Amino acid sequence: MATRRIDEVSFDHGAQYFTIRSDRFHDSLKAGQADGVIQSWNGEVVSLSRDGLSQRFQPATPRYAGVPSMNALPKAMAIGLDVRVDEQVAKITGDPGRWFLHIADRREGPFDWVFATAPAPQSSAVLPSRFAHHDMLGAVEMSACFTLMIRLDYDGSIPFVAARIDDPVIDWISRNNTKPGRSEAPCLVVNSNSMWADANTDKPLDTIRQKMIEAVRRYIPVAPSEADAAMIHRWRYANVQRPAGSAYLMDRASQLAACGDWCIGGRVEAAFLSGAGLADALREIIEASE
Ligand SMILES: Cc1cc2nc3c(=O)[nH]c(=O)nc-3n(C[C@H](O)[C@H](O)[C@H](O)COP(=O)(O)OP(=O)(O)OC[C@H]3O[C@@H](n4cnc5c(N)ncnc54)[C@H](O)[C@@H]3O)c2cc1C
């Protein structure tokens, strides 16, 4: 749930929206709904292909967005927590009940338990070899995605709020400024399709940017000045192709665990349910030991 800002324009360059299907997620979001941190994002979605616009539909499940930006929801959930950003854990060392996190040239700890919440391949890289579920982490398949962000001078001629696209390079275009609470400045968020992203993951970002702009122009006019200012972001682990099939991975003996959307499926709600399930399991262990 990521947002990038340029001047007064914001782009949700990660999750585009989320849906709420479970009671647990619904209940956890009541406060956010009351505070206006999440609001529904309505409007027709269309299906586009090179033959033109084939279908218009109102999605059956309401779509929600963070307000004024997608990252407003995790920010609200993190109030009161000690969250450190821009800290990359390089490895975890120690023993059960005495774990240390190695970050740049220092280590932090000891910690009783460590939960890895990074994508499966990155969690696998940092969790010690004694973690009992490395085989399940290794079986998870995730694919990449490139996201193109374009500020437009005018978007009044675009006949949709968002489009699913049948194209070899891109599969989604949304007008980010149509989400609630955004600036009116027209701006597009475009996602590549997974197969194309996987085949091109390590290509120079400028080449990717050009290819995606060419693809967008098959559907929407983009002026040279708008194309020149467009930004690109690479997500190495964006879509979950094969989930772990277990809501979280917990190793009670080593006091290590892992959770994330990749346990269940590539959706915001799946990430929440995985984390909530693991939190419940830890709470039970703590209560049993009291
Ligand atoms: C382009 C895109 C579009 C999407 N669209 C939608 C959508 O429309 N609807 C929807 O429901 N879902 C969507 N998703 C999926 C949704 O974003 C994910 O399901 C959700 O963000 C997963 O949350 P998470 O907490 O499991 O993992 P993440 O959000 O991936 O968070 C993992 C975090 O771990 C950090 N990390 C990794 N390695 C380390 C390390 N070594 N040390 C410290 N930190 C580390 C990462 O920086 C990251 O912040 C989309 C995803 C992408 C990429």
Image: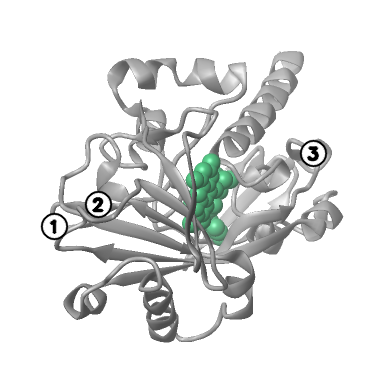
Q: Decide if residue 227 is on the left or right side of residue 84.
A: left
Q: Decide if residue 164 is on the left or right side of residue 156.
A: right
Label 1 crowd bin: few (<14), some (14–19), many (20+), radius 10 Å: few
Q: Nearer the viewer, residue 28 or 36?
A: 36
Q: Residue at x 62, y 22 (%)?
A: 22
Mark 3: which amino acid? Answer: Ser
Q: Residue at x 27, y 34 (%)?
A: 180
Q: Decide if residue 215 is on the left or right side of residue 182.
A: right
Tell me whether the residue at label 2 lies in contact with that at label 1, contact meaning CB atoms closer than 8 angstroms. Answer: no
Residue 152, given in percent of the width and then of the height, sits at 20, 63
Mark 2: which amino acid? Answer: Ser
Q: Decide if residue 135 is on the left or right side of residue 68.
A: right
On screen, residue 132 above or below 219: above
Which residue is the site of mark 3?
246
Whether residue 73 is visible to the viewer of this picture, yes or no, is: yes
Q: Secondary structure at mark 2?
A: strand
Q: Nearer the viewer, residue 123 or 69?
A: 69
Q: Indicate which disc residue 7 carries.
A: 1
